[in-house]
Image (spheres, grey):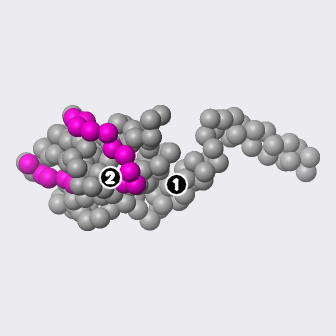
């Protein structure tokens, strides 16, 4: 029993050390995001960034400490991930379950800082071929001002 207690203390110490710069609210967010994967199967990062679907072509990302930069604005990488996820989901929805979608290239133009409670990403498919798709994603703040625009090429492959 002492061995198990010591082992548990060691594991807890290792986990704590690996999250040394994160507060426990972020740790809780990661664990909640991990649990959501079973019911809404896209990658863990999308769940952790608080991305939720509005419809097949758009999603909302709530802004908070898990996706903000040091200035309190949405982090550029979080906006990039939102665009990537929204476009890929739009393509996958149009193609069905028997095909996979992979990002080949994604370019992002940041237009203004994203502050507030949330941003919304909206996908538009420009080309949907048998092997590739080209799309764009516009990201708007809660005042419907354009924050960023992404343009991407995606590879379509059979499972």
Q: CA distance from mark 1 to mark 2?
A: 22 Å
Horizontal relation, residue 15 to residue 93: left or right: right
Nearest to viewer (mark 1 / mark 2):
2
Q: Which numbered disc flags the more N-terminal residue, 1 or 2?
A: 1
Instruction: Specify the label residue 45 is tagged with.
Output: none
Q: Is residue 16 magenta?
A: no
**What's the magenta bit mostly, secondary-structure-wise?**
strand
Please give the residue where the numbered disc 1 appears in the rendered image.
Answer: 34
Say if 124 sits above or below 20 in the image. below
Q: Secondary structure at mark 1?
A: helix
- The residue lying toward the viewer, choosing from 80 and 116, is 116
Vertical placement of residue 102 versus 58, above or below: above
Residue at image position (40%, 41%) is 73
Start-end of magenta stretch:
109-126
Residue 112 on image: x %, y %: 27, 39
Residue furthest right in the image: 2
Sort mark 2 into few (<14), some (14-19) or many (20+) by Cα contacts within 10 Å: many
Q: Answer whether residue 67 is visible to the viewer in this image.
A: yes
Task: Pick whichever, 36 or 137, lies toward us.
Answer: 137
Asked where in the image residue 40 lies, by quadrant, the reply is bottom left
**Residue 138 in the image, given as x and y percentages of width and height:** 20, 48
* Residue 37 location (% of width, % of height): 46, 58
Q: Nearer the viewer, residue 22 or 38?
A: 22
- Label annotation for residue 119: 2
Q: Is residue 133 left or right of residue 108?
A: left
* Residue displayed at 79% across by 39% down: 10
């Amino acid at each position: 029993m002492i061995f198990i207690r010591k082992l548990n203390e060691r594991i807890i110490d290792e986990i704590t050390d690996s999250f040394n710069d994160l507060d426990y609210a972020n740790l809780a967010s990661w664990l909640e995001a991990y649990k959501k994967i079973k019911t809404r199967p896209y990658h863990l990062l999308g769940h952790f960034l608080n991305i939720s679907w509005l419809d097949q072509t758009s999603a909302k990302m709530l802004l908070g400490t898990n996706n903000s930069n040091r200035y309190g604005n949405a982090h550029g990488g979080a906006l990039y991930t939102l665009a990537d996820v929204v476009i890929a989901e739009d393509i996958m929805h149009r193609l069905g379950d028997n095909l996979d979608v992979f990002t080949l290239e994604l370019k992002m133009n940041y237009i203004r800082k994203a502050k507030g409670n949330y941003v919304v990403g909206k996908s538009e498919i420009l080309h949907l071929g048998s092997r590739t798709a080209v799309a764009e994603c516009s990201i708007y703040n809660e005042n419907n001002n354009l924050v960023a625009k992404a343009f991407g090429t995606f590879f379509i492959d059979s499972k």
